[in-house]
Image (tube, grey):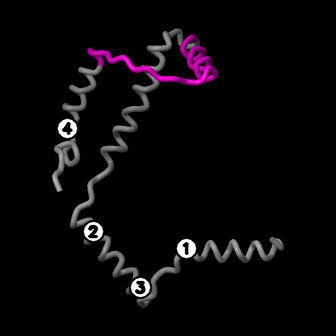
Amino acid sequence: MALRKEEYYYDPHEERKSMDKAKTSKQRITIEVSSELNDLIAAAAEEQKLSINQYLENVLGEIMPLHRMKQRDRKPINKEAVEKLRQFQAQLLQERDGEPFDDSVNLLREAREEREKELGL
């Protein structure tokens, strides 16, 4: 399995360069929104004395770093992680004297059927 540099290496200077470059070059995007949402956006922009374009750029600028952080927190699975999970599974089974956990789907189904009987459904 091939890994890209971005998947295992984070360089804040590269991110900064990318953000600086994005500030200097602009790209046009087109989106369709309901008239109600358009009115809300226009009112919010006017309230902040910004154009709709500036307002949306600010909003998206606040959201995207959060999205980028979430992506960075994801780590690809590797053999070591799989082995740790297997060890944890073995430890749980040992603590439960080899008895696996009950299937939660079946437990929920049984509880629902019981409740339906109580309600006369």
Is residue 88 highlighted in magenta? no
Q: Quadrant of residue 118?
A: bottom right
Residue range in magenta is: 23-46
Name the quadrant of the C terminus: bottom right
3D distance between C-alphas at marks 1 and 3: 19 Å
Q: Residues within 10 Å of mark 4 (few under 14, many from 20)?
A: few
**Compared to 3, does 21 lie above or below?**
above
Q: Disc number at residue 82?
A: 2
Name the quadrant of the N terminus: bottom left
Is tag 1's residue or tag 2's residue first in the polypeptide sequence?
2
Identify the residue at horizontal 32%, vertical 50% (top origin).
74
3D distance between C-alphas at marks 3 and 4: 42 Å
Q: Which residue is mark 4?
A: 11
Report the label total. 4
Q: Disc number at residue 95?
A: 3
Amino acid residing under circle 2? Val
Mark 3 in CB contact with mark 4 (< 8 angstroms): no
Q: Which residue is mark 1?
A: 104
Q: Disc number at residue 119?
A: none
